[in-house]
Amino acid sequence: MKNQGLFVTLFLVLAALLAFVFFRASRTEIHRPWPLAPGEAERLGLSEPVAASLALASLAPSSHNTQPWKVRVLSEREVLVLLDEQRLLPAVDPHRREALVSIGAFLENLVRGAGLQGLAAIVEVTVEDPTDTQVARVRFEPKAEPGDPKTLEAILARDTFRGNLPPTELPEETVRALAGTAPSRWTFFPSQSPEGTWIGKATVEANRVQASRDDAMEELARWIRFSPAAARQHRDGLTTSGMGLPAPVRAFMALFFSEKSVSGKSFREAGVKRAAEQALACAGFFVLGSPDGSPPSAVQAGRDLEAFWLEAAARGVAVHPMSQFLEESPWKEEAASRLKIAGTVQMILRVGLAPAPHRPVSPRRPLERFVETETR
Ligand SMILES: Cc1cc2nc3c(=O)[nH]c(=O)nc-3n(C[C@H](O)[C@H](O)[C@H](O)COP(=O)(O)O)c2cc1C
């Protein structure tokens, strides 16, 4: 009898310990630079409005959440926005196109964020060659009209949605408003249209090809943050919460996965299977084109992407870029002619009505890790 009591107690203690370990391994921590910490702007030698604008800018999307931006402060009113060469993805983005698109999204948020702080941010795009690290020069000037508070809501709410989306058609008015954010550059293909079906199939095939490339998988592995501790340390990359994985899977990955697991057969196969489910579960695909494949066009595409995404966030439309299609042959070469897009295809977005409100969880670095000032 006494022994039985001891066993029950031991069992309960063990179960509680296990539950605690799983809970800690699966928890979602939010690491985002908004709102600014007290004294943060001053510590960096920045004015409060400029620091706040940069923090909002950094909530922009970027491939693998590399956050490939660096900001050099020239004066109280002027900064350079640079490409951080430590944060490139040579295996899947050898020409730095996606990195420049990501910086374009950062610039769009910077302009809108500055507007909320009573500043006009005047952007001069300076990048000409893909190897240039200086992308833009930004000047801040006082502005009379106040920014729209809805812009702040949209910047804070925008995120990548990787779950299944209902195949429900998007209302015509929503499609028009989203395409209207850059009228001649966005085209919508419903999932049942011939082009939509082709995009879905090509996306799965491109995922399969990419999953078979060791260099792409090793690169991906370097940007996956398997545990809450890794996310807290790096504050970048792809977290298991950001991937939308359920808590038991997050706990399992935190406890048992490493960079090596990503190169394993089962991880590669699971990724392709998931992409196949995602490609089918949506209302359709928005495709962004630009006149050419030059670096300034990639930056403009990033600005278009973010303008679109903020409008989508405000309208409850979930957005998921699926880029393997634009990273692998033969699809990247075929995309423009198959979809009758004049010029270069810059982004393919899976979209649908967001099933439920959710909060963004993808981490961002604090300002001090991407802003260089004279004082530091
Ligand atoms: C140029 C570009 C390409 C992207 N490609 C993909 C992609 O192929 N698959 C994906 O799941 N997310 C993709 N994303 C989304 C990023 O992974 C996401 O923005 C980043 O992880 C930060 O998360 P957030 O958008 O929720 O803030 C892409 C984003 C950008 C800007």
Image (cartoon, rainbow, N blue to C red):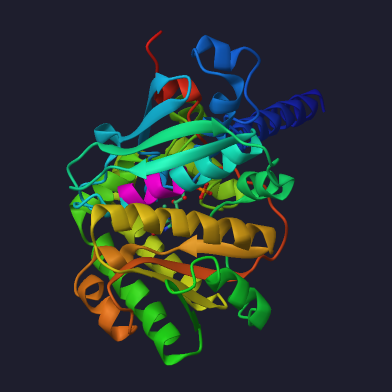
Residue 207 in sight here: no
> Where is residue 298, by image quadrant?
bottom left
Give residue 336's quadrant in the image.
Answer: bottom left
Residue 176 coordinates in the image, percent (x, y): 60, 77
Name the residue rendered at 57%, 78% in the picture.
283
Left or right: 305, with 360 as reference point: left
Residue 203 in view (yes/no) = yes
From this view, report whether residue 268 is shown above or below residue 138: below
- Classify the position of the C terminus by image quarter: top left
Measured as percent of width and height from the top left, residue 116 is found at: 65, 38
**173 relative to 187 in the view: left or right:** right
The quarter of the rendered structure image containing the N terminus is top right
Q: Is residue 21 above or below residue 348?
A: above
Residue at 19 percent across and 50 percent down: it is 215
Q: Nearer the viewer, residue 29 or 290?
A: 290
Of all residues shown, which one is farthest toward the front? Answer: 144
Q: Is residue 192 left or right of residue 49?
A: left
Say if the magenta span includes residue 105. Answer: yes
* Predominant secondary structure, magenta span: helix
Numbered range of the magenta stretch = 99-106
Q: Locate residue 139, reporting x and y percent.
A: 44, 33
Q: Residue at x 67, y 47 (%)?
A: 359
